[in-house]
Image (cartoon, rainbow, N blue to C red):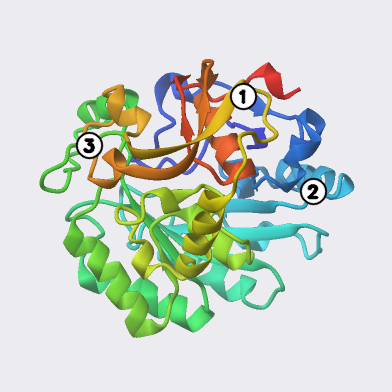
Amino acid sequence: MLGNSLEKCLNCSYCRLMGESKKKIVFDKLPSEINPLFIDLPVAVNLFYGDPMLQIDSTISYLKRLEEVKHRGPVVIITKGSFSKFPDMEFDLDLHFAFSTFGINSKYDGGNLKNFENNLKLISKTKYKYSIEYRPVIKDINDSPEVVENIYKMANKYNAPIGFCGLQVNDELKQHFIENNINFEAYDGYELGLKKSLSQEVEDLFYNLGEKYNVPTFRKTSCLISYSHNLDRDYNAHYYRPNEMRCSKCPMKDKCLEYKKEQDSLDIEYVNIPFEHKIIHKEKHVCMLHRKGICKFANDDCKNISGKIIKIKQGITSSDLRVIKWLTGYTVDCDFEEIEYISDNWL
């Protein structure tokens, strides 16, 4: 992530950046300035409190800096602001715009459908890659067949793939709901928390509409970005949990499963990461989030991760873990702390 946080945004009721989370954030160092290996990593620009279009000068500045160092990985701008603010200029980057929508005009959401469709109309006339982020899907708020189908009709009209997910809630956001009398409910069998859970019925609704309107549909944004940018695999390695991630429905299915099959067959013990480790084969590995009790709603995939994995013998951060997956394609067995910064080991 690159960018700055602002003191104002679009005031969406479900935003996780509440309270102390709104503290001023500046992530200013380009990936390749930290480590040359990072030149191929995906980058999100100004994905903090404060939409990228609300700070367009800052957003453009980061794009120019990435262009100067010839960054090769996907550069993603996720916005529900007005794309009309983006200047009529091209960047020598693998740039992607993801237009976020709540699906309806709502008191809970800072965007609106008129601006959303206008964004699609404008970007469809450019050479940029783009997509739709339908999120968060909330029970009995924006998950009805009529509401979702309306967005799929727009996706078909403007030739945009769709990524979707449920609501993720931290402790500060729970308190915000209480203080503001916001009564969002979890789907049956779940509770509001870390897991962006949806009912099977709602998931099926998205995939069925994707087939009906010929719109590529993705449970995870990284899968959508990997597809749109013709990568060899999902850079977030969700293929280790193919049932939970509904890989059978994903346009990346053949690429990802073939990649994992080939990777599992490689006779190597080490990869280029700055931590003491070894590559091992493991059956029925359990996700660390479940083992630590952080995630209470593990499914069968979360407790049956199989194949070659990286076993790290020292403590790392959750951000290290994600970067390792992006760089190597392997999932990781390790002890980690949930921290938004990577370790100095990478320098």
* Residue 110 shows up from this direction: no
| Mark 2–mark 3 distance (CA, rounded to whole Å) | 37 Å
Vertical placement of residue 330 versus 114, above or below? above
In this view, the residue farthest toward the left is: 188
- Tell me the SS state at disc 1: loop
User: Tag 2: residue type?
Assistant: His
Q: Residue under circle 3? A: 192
Q: Residue under circle 1? A: 342
- Which corner quadrant holds the N terminus? top right
Vertical placement of residue 166 versus 9, above or below? below
Of callouts 1 and 2, the N-terminal one: 2
- Tell me the SS state at disc 3: loop
* Residue 158 shows up from this direction: yes
User: Tag 3: residue type?
Assistant: Leu
Q: Quadrant of residue 168?
A: top left
114 and 170: which is toward the camera: 170
178 and 73: which is toward the camera: 73
Q: Position of residue 61 (x, y in %)?
A: 79, 43
Q: Residue under circle 2? A: 71
Residue 164 numbered tag: none
Left or right: 70, with 149 as reference point: right
Vertical placement of residue 329 versus 343, above or below? below
Answer whether labels 2 and 3 touch (C-beta < 8 Å): no
Q: Position of residue 260 (x, y in %)?
A: 50, 55
What residue sits 64% from the left and 33% below the top?
A: 270
User: Tag 1: residue type?
Assistant: Ile
Answer whether labels 1 and 2 touch (C-beta < 8 Å): no
